[in-house]
Image (tube, rainbow, N blue to C red):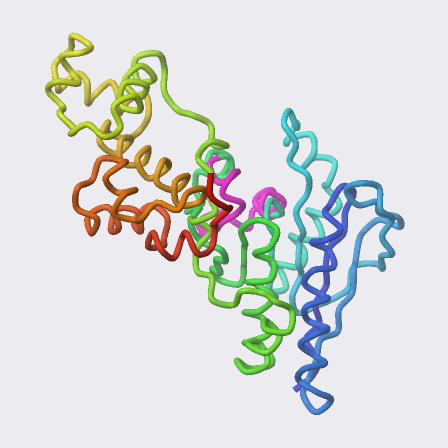
């Protein structure tokens, strides 16, 4: 078996850590696999002679060449960014992506590198993922793409997309597992202190950072639900508080937010429970009661549905210290 040729496409403003993160893990895997296994031939390529990454770090690059896997890193998606202008300025890189894909070889994006793949037309009628914070924006720009915001890595017909930043290691471990075997991937993860058992980015989602949907009516309903988090859900009483019928309440709330008041209440209770699990020593049963559930089992099942983890597992991962 010959060495797997991996090219990382560098471009102005890309994250340098995402340029070198995958190659560094592949280098470790090659050392672990030993000289008798095929390794990895990694290059950093660009259609430009000089590239400065985000923060101004100069990157040494070589011209694009034929590779088995082309990795496209992400870039700084700052508030107020004109994404259309940013992508237009990367037309040479998008042409390289499109040309590589035409050969039938693998294309991989890290984080918001998915937007370059989308501009190259590679995500049409495919499943994809990206950083959870920007998944809605990708779905808005790509109505023909099945965006899976909960997934860490999605591969669909030769095109792989990953979630934010550290998901490059989840992809790299998958690549090592495929090329060098499960034992090498497992050992590489242990040596590098990389989690090789993650399956979802859902536990990392911070709802406070997501745009809050809705207009004045739905936001007033949300506020009332938030202020009565532990109260029994009573649709008729909620509608009465706003002088509308239950049918009108459900319709207007769904039109403005895309969900029901009950779904919003459940998500709000889970948000509060996450905070308590992260910052207090209260028992799971105590937290369950504090967010309106007398049955801790029902609460645990709802929590797992929203976060991908049971309450105790979530606390073990995200505990920040009491108080």
The reply, left or right, for residue 307 in relation to residue 128 is: left
The reply, left or right, for residue 310 in relation to residue 251 is: right
List x then y, in percent, for residue 77: 64, 36
List x then y, in percent, for residue 178: 55, 76
Q: Residue at x 50, y 32 (%)?
A: 209
List x then y, in percent, for residue 254: 26, 25
Q: Residue furthest top?
A: 243
Q: Nearer the viewer, residue 319 or 105?
A: 319
Query: Any magenta on residue 19?
Result: no
Q: Nearer the viewer, residue 136 or 62?
A: 136
Q: Residue furthest bottom?
A: 36
Q: Nearer the viewer, residue 33 or 316?
A: 316
Q: Nearer the viewer, residue 273 or 11?
A: 273
65, above or below 138, in the image: below
Answer with the quarter of the image where residue 226 lies.
top left
Q: Residue at x 77, y 64 (%)?
A: 65
The reply, left or right, for residue 79 in relation to residue 15 is: left
105, above or below 134, in the image: below
218, above or below 37, in the image: above
Identify the magenta region. 114-136
């Amino acid at each position: 078996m010959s060495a797997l040729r991996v090219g990382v496409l560098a471009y102005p403003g890309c994250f340098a850590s995402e340029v070198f993160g995958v190659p560094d893990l592949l280098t470790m895997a090659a050392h672990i696999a030993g000289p008798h296994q095929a390794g990895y031939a990694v290059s950093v390529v660009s259609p430009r002679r000089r590239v400065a990454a985000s923060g101004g770090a100069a990157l040494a690059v070589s011209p694009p060449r034929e590779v088995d896997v082309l990795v496209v890193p992400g870039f700084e998606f700052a508030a107020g960014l004109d994404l259309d202008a940013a992508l237009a300025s990367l037309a040479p890189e998008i042409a390289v992506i499109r040309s590589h894909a035409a050969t039938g070889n693998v294309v991989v994006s890290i984080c918001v590198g998915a937007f370059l793949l989308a501009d190259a037309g590679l995500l049409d009628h495919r499943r994809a993922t990206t950083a959870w914070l920007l998944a809605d924006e990708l779905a808005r720009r790509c109505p023909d793409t099945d965006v899976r915001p909960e997934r860490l890595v999605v591969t669909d017909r030769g095109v792989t997309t990953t979630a934010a930043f550290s998901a490059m290691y989840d992809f790299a471990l998958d690549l090592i597992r495929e090329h060098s075997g499960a034992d090498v991937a497992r050992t590489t993860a242990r040596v590098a202190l990389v989690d090789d058992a993650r399956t979802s980015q859902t536990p990392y989602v911070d709802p406070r950072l997501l745009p809050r949907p809705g207009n004045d009516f739905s936001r007033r309903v949300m506020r009332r639900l938030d202020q009565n988090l532990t109260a029994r859900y009573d649709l008729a009483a909620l509608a009465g508080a706003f002088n509308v019928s239950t049918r009108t309440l459900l319709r207007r709330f769904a039109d403005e937010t895309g969900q029901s008041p009950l779904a919003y209440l459940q998500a709000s209770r889970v948000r509060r429970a996450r905070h308590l699990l992260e910052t207090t020593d209260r028992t799971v049963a105590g937290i369950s009661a504090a967010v309106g559930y007398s049955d801790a089992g029902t609460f645990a099942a709802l929590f797992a549905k929203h976060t991908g983890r049971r309450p105790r597992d979530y606390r073990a991962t995200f505990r920040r210290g009491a108080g």
